[in-house]
Structures are given as C-alpha cells and as structure tokens.
Image (cartoon, grey):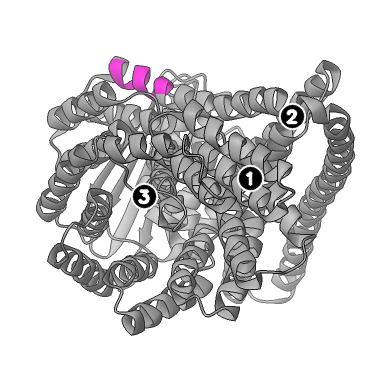
Amino acid sequence: MYFINYYKKKICIIICCRIFTSLMLLSSNMYGQQYSKESIDSLENLLGASSMSDNELFRIYKDLTDAYIFTDTEKSLKYAWIGVNMAGERNNPYQIAEFYYYLGGVYYYSSKQDSALYYFDQSLEMLKHMKKNDEKGMDSLQIELYFSIGIINNNQGKYNLALDNYINALALAEKIKKTDKTVLIYGYLANTYYSISNFQQAETYYLKAESLSRELNDSIRLAEAWQGLCSINIKKEDYATALKYAEESLKILTSLPNVPATKMMRANQYLTDIWLYIPDYGKAMQYARKTVEYARQTNIPSFLSTALYMISHCYLKQGKYRESEETAFEALATDTSILYTNSILYGNIALANMWMGKPAKSEEYFRKTTNAIRAYSNQNFQSSLTEMEVKYETEKKEMQIVAFKEEKRLMTGLSIATGVVLLLVLAVFIFLWRWSIQKKRIAEQQKQLAEQQVIQLEKEKQLVATQAVFDGEVRERTRLARDLHDGLGGKLTCMKINLQELQQIARFDDKKEIQLNAIMEILDDSVREMRRVSHNLMPETLSRSGLKQAIGDFCRSMSSLIVFNWYGDESRLDMKLEAMIYRSIHELVNNALKYADASKIMVQIIREADSISFTVQDDGCGFDTAVEAEGMGLKSIRARVASLGGMILIDSKAGEGTEVNVELVVSG
C-alpha cells in the first residue's frame, strides 16, 4: 500500500505539471491566435497576389503556420519551410531564425519535443552570430526562445537547464522592460523551483509574480501566483492560508469573462486537494465535481480522465469503495492513452477492492499499476530513440561522439558510485564491530564493579549501565537507519534517475546496453539491500506510525503463521520503550521461526492505563527451561526488561511449545 500511495503522489505531481506545461507556449504572443476558416482562406488567397512585399509574405507564411499548428501539422510545417527557404533566398538570417522558432513550435505541439528543441537551438544559435540591426526585435525573439527551451527542459525533468534558460529570458525581458513577459517568467521560475523542492525560492518568485501582477492589473497572472502560494502553504501544512489563496484565486477567475476552462479546472483542483488534506471529503467532492465539469468543456480526454480520478479518490477517502472503482473505470474508458494516468487509476481500483475484501482483483490491479509505470518509462525511452533516429540521421557521427562521451561519463559515475557504496557498507560494518566491542567492554566493566560492591548496589548500577547501553543502541540504530535511508538511499535513487536519463539520451550498441542494464540491476539490488539493513536497524514505521503499526507490518512480512492482536489504548509510548518492545518481539518471533518448528505463532499486546504487556507464544518443539541454558537473545531480552523495571516469565516444556510473557510499567 505504501508503494501505491508513494507513486500516486508522484504521478499526481506529474499530471498537474503536464496539465500546466501542455499550455505553456500558448502564453507566447507568437502562437495560439484564433483563426476562422474564412480568415485562413483569405490568407491563402493573398499568396497569389503579385504586389506583395517580402515582409508581407513573411507575415502571411507565419500566420498560416500559426493557423494550422493545432489542426494540420503537415500544412503548418509546409508553410514554415516555405518561409525558411524564401528567407534563405533573400539572404535574411533574422527571418530564418524566426521561422526556425515557428518550426520548433509546430513540433512542440505535435509532441515531438526533441525536434522542437533542435530548431529552437538552431534559431538561438543564428541570433547569437547576427549583427544587432533590430536589437529590440532580436531580444524579443531570444526571450521567446530561451523561454520555450526552458519549458521543454522542464518537461524532460532537466530542471537546472530549465532554470538557466528561464533566467536568461528574464534578464532580457527586464532589459527591454517587457513586464508582461517578466511576470510570466516569474511564474515559471517559481513552478520549476517548486518541482525540485526548493520551496523558499519558489515562494520568492510567486511573491514577485503577485506584486508585478498587481502593478499590471493582470488578474489572470495574479490568480496563478495565488495558486502557487497555495501550493507552498500546502507544503508547509498551513492549510488555512492555502485555502485562503485558493479561494481568492477561484473568486477572481470566476469574476472575469471568458476565462479558459483549463484555468478554472486547475483552480478547482487546488481546492479539491486542500479539502482532502484538511480533511473535509464532502467539500473536496464538491470541487472535484466542478473540476470534472470544466474538464469536459476542454474536450481534452486526458484532462477529463485526470479530473475523474479526483472524484474516484474522494470516494475512496469517504469509504465509498464501489463508487471509487466505478469512477476509476469511467476515467479509463474516457482515455487510456496516458500511461501515468492509467497507473494511478489502477491503484485506486486495487485499493478499493482491497477494502471491499476482493484480494484477487486487488492483486490484479496492483500488478497493472506496476506494469503501467514500467510501460510509461519504457515508452518514453523508445519514443525518444525513434525520433532521434528519424530527425537526426544526418548527425549520426556527431551523435556517436556524444554517445561515447556520455558513456565515458556514465562509467566514471558508476565507478565513483560503486566506490561510495563500498565505503558506506564498510563504514556500517566497522560501526557494528566497534559497537559490539564497546558493548562487550561495558559488560566487562560492569562485571568488575559487581565483584567490588554489595549485591544490591551491583544490581542497581548494572541496571543503569544496561539502560544507557540500550538507550545508546536505540539512538545509534535510529541515526544509522536514517543516515542509510535518507543519505545513501537518496543518493542511490538520484543516481538511478540520472542513469535512466543518460540511458535515454545516449545511444549504445547491444553489448553496451546489456552491460548498462546489468549495472542498473546491481544498483537496484544495492537499494534493496540498503533498505533491508536500514529497516532491520530501526524500522521507519516505528518512528512514523508507532508500535502497533510497526509490529503489525513486521508480523505480516515474516510469515502467514503469525497472528497479531492488540488490545487496549493505541496511543504512542516513549520511543525508548517502543524500540525495546519491538526489538524483543522481533527476537522472540525470529527464534520461534528458526528453532521451534511451529505451525502457529501468536503475538499479543495489551495496553492499559499504567502498564503494557506482550506475549509471544508458539506451538513448536519447546525446551526444558531447567536443563537448557538460555541463548544470547533471551538474555538480552531479560536485560532490556530488567533495565526498565519490568517482569519476564518464560514457560516452556519439550514438545509443548513456548510462551514468553513480559509486563512493563508505563509512566504517566
């Protein structure tokens, strides 16, 4: 379930970004004008006039490129190339650069972002080598190019490049005092910083966008800035402030005429999210239904599918699992072309069926969720390769050189990563060895003190020393588990993402591809091993969700033979006490599984107002407590219990199983 929830959050972020960035270039004053059939026919008829000047012809070819950009890609490309060839014949490099920009726009809106990026780069390169006869016009075009390249970088997840290009565009916009473009770039800078979790910088640019929007009296940009500030406050868990921004944003958009349905849809999405967080699932459903209403107006199936997912999610939160499943199926019937949308819908169906007690169907859709995520990643990789082969056939030699360089960089990165992993693993083993030596040394010191003092004083000091050891153990386990999970885990995950990006960019032969896949598998194994070690040291569930959840997860993960029950108060205990109980049950269950040959193991915890007790019982082979000496595990548990002033009782007979009861006092 954690896996599904994690990916649902990640994919929801992707969906919001896709909805937002799919309309990004519409903000340009060079794209997205509305043309009627009559106006298009009129433009095409003008091409036959003999009295047209070059500049007039250039303008018509640009208008026709723009007119067909959403409806007929071939015609749009045709007129853009006519403009390129005409500008070449007239020796007009600025017009060539501008038509390259239009070519990039056509490819962008036909979802061929690599080709779009190629022509945007070509246009920008031409401008850099031209004499500045019309400096303001060239600066304006450069702003659009940097801005468009930044959008593609952002869509591809290359956030550092996106930021560089947005900042270049911003510098030019501020230079020529193009305030309408400046406020727009503020918004995209903020969104990109938000994507990389730099919320402080994101908030700075949202506030700049808010201030400049007020100066310009630009209500649309002001509403978008408020939506950004709403996102920041959601991250801060300040839902009251987030709600205020979201409601103000919707209020101002509602008051304006002819606001695009996409913007109204997005405003209602924010309010749906906030009420899910607060939570008030009734209000969340109210705004989710409005989101669907506006999504239908867009006539874009992927938007409607996403909006229906929000309805499904609200039903799931309300415990209406049948309705959640039905809405998810409706969304899938609306649009299945977007694999990342499919994956979260499959996840909702899986969770709904799990709660409805249909494990077979739940398992089926959990598998579909995983397969959809894998297919999405593979689709992106394959489409990128295909487009690169088609569009850049003439650049084969150059691409091979780039591939060799990327391969060399990849191998260097892998070598460094392997070295880091080995060093960290070595550090873990050294720590465990030193910790073991230190524990033995403390035990020896306690033994020497016990021989010099009276029995009662010896017992009291031994308890204090033992408590200190176990406190230190809890702290060190927690610290080491956190360092492994947050430090090494984050770096390994980041490394994997970078390798996947390099795998998409670089072109390798079959042998290198096999080697790279083998390296990726080794990296996956390293991540899994790191997580296993981290979880064994100190499970994240224990610190995050408490003892009941941690023990329940542990029992389910170990064996179906284990039955776990919790009775009484479920409130949190002192972390030290929770860790001691968890480690003790962990040791007792492992002993039962390894040595008892049991067919059933019962774990029971009873929480009362001033005490907590736990029992681990099995029907295995048992042992004679009068004959057999206790192992290190039971001795350690006795010491832990004694250090906290508790009582332990072990009842076992050969052939009759074993029962261990522990009772501990809970201080107020």
Element type where label 3 sits in the image? loop
Residue 497 appears anywhere in the view:
no
Q: Which mark is residue 100?
A: 1
The first of marks 2 and 1 along the sequence is 1
* Segment colored magenta: 361-368
Residue 532's image quarter?
top right
Please state, as top left, top right, bottom left or bottom right, where the C terminus lies in the image. bottom left
Q: Residues within 10 Å of mark 2 (few under 14, many from 20)?
A: some
Q: Local crowd at mark 1 within 10 Å, few (<14), some, or many (≥20)?
A: many
Q: Is residue 417 above or below residue 184?
A: above
Mark 2 and mark 3: span between their CA atoms? Answer: 31 Å
Q: From the viewer's perspective, tell me whether residue 337 is left or right of residue 495.
A: left
Secondary structure at badge 2 equals: loop
Q: Secondary structure at mark 1?
A: helix
**Residue in view at x 41 percent, y 66 percent:** 574
Amino acid type, callout 1: Tyr
Which residue does the numbered mark 2 point to in the structure image? 392
Q: Nearer the viewer, residue 52 or 328?
A: 52
Q: Tell me the mark number nearer the camera, choosing from 2 and 1.
A: 1
Give whichever of discs 3 and 1 has the lower sequence position.
3
- The residue under label 2 is which amino acid type? Tyr
* Rendered location of residue 549, percent (x, y): 37, 46
Three-letter amino acid code at the position of disc 3: Gln
The disc at residue 400 is none
The CA distance from mark 2 to mark 1 is 16 Å
Q: Is residue 369 left or right of residue 461?
A: left
Q: Which residue is mark 3?
A: 33
Q: Nearer the viewer, residue 357 or 619?
A: 357
